[in-house]
Amino acid sequence: MKEVLELIEKKKQEFAQLPLFKYMQDTSIEPRLRLAWAPCAAPFIMSFGDLNKFVLREEPTNEIIQTIINRHTYEDERHWIWFVKDIETLELDELLTFSDTLRFLWGKEAEIPRWLTYELCRYIFQGNIIQKLVVVEAIEATGNVMFSIAAKIGQEIKSIHKKNCLYFSDFHLAVETGHATGSEHIEKVLTQIELTEKEKLEAFVLVEEVFEIFTKMLDSFLVYAIQYRKEQSLKVVHNCPTPMYC
Ligand SMILES: [Fe+2]
């Protein structure tokens, strides 16, 4: 597993260079606008709780890796609660009816985040226990990059607007360690897992695929954030309360 973890680390460094992260670190843009992709991410973030609860978790188990995964799911199944709170804090609540909200969440703009969730389910259901762990570790690596950067925006929002974010915060980052959580000395435990040559090669392919689908999702967030920013400037120019619908 050591070589698989090394590949995840290498992919993580590349992932950190994505244009969305550059955008999120551009302090010339108002901090809340740098997180304006959040509504578009909602289908993934909300279903990630269920993915932990219903797809990753298998109980009861005597299997050591499944036990590690199960412990981890109890942490990650509830982070969507912080996300919903932050949507309010970031003033991203548009005046949408319930039907318009459904159209948005199941529409084109949030299609890639929905697709990513199903892709993850496919990897998990089709994979063996090692592959399941590899998916968890790759997801956690992407999460660690995201929350390292998002937490800094949360700090800026706190100092400028005196508002506390929960999802985009150091508080969240503290539990996004980059590895499965809930088990002691997890990095050591993971590196000691012996893989056959075949398992290792399959894991390498899986790591590449997980990073690829997350890259697609983050690229779609950037498109949405840029569009949202343009619409916000129109709102200022035309004094339109809901520019997307004017
Ligand atoms: Fe999380």
Image (spheres, grey):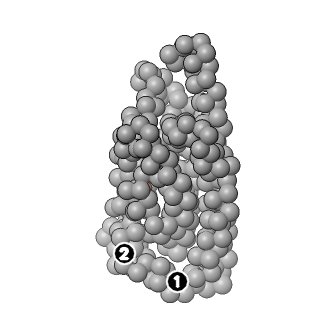
- Point out residue 188 in the picture as x, y percentages from the top left corner: 47, 84
Residue 50 visible somewhere in the drawing: no
Disc on the earlier residue, 1 or 2: 2
Q: Nearer the viewer, residue 47 or 175?
A: 175
What's the mark number on residue 191?
A: 1
Disc 2 target residue: 183
Q: Toward which corner of the image does residue 158 lie, by quadrant?
A: top left
Rendered residue at 35%/52% (across/down):
78
Residue type, label 2: Ser
Q: Nearer the viewer, residue 95 or 232?
A: 232
Q: Residues within 10 Å of mark 2 (few under 14, many from 20)?
A: some
Residue type, label 1: Thr
What's the mark number on residue 180?
A: none
Rendered residue at 40%/41% (across/down):
86
Q: Which quarter holds ligand 1?
A: bottom left
Where is the C terminus found, in terms of image quarters?
top right
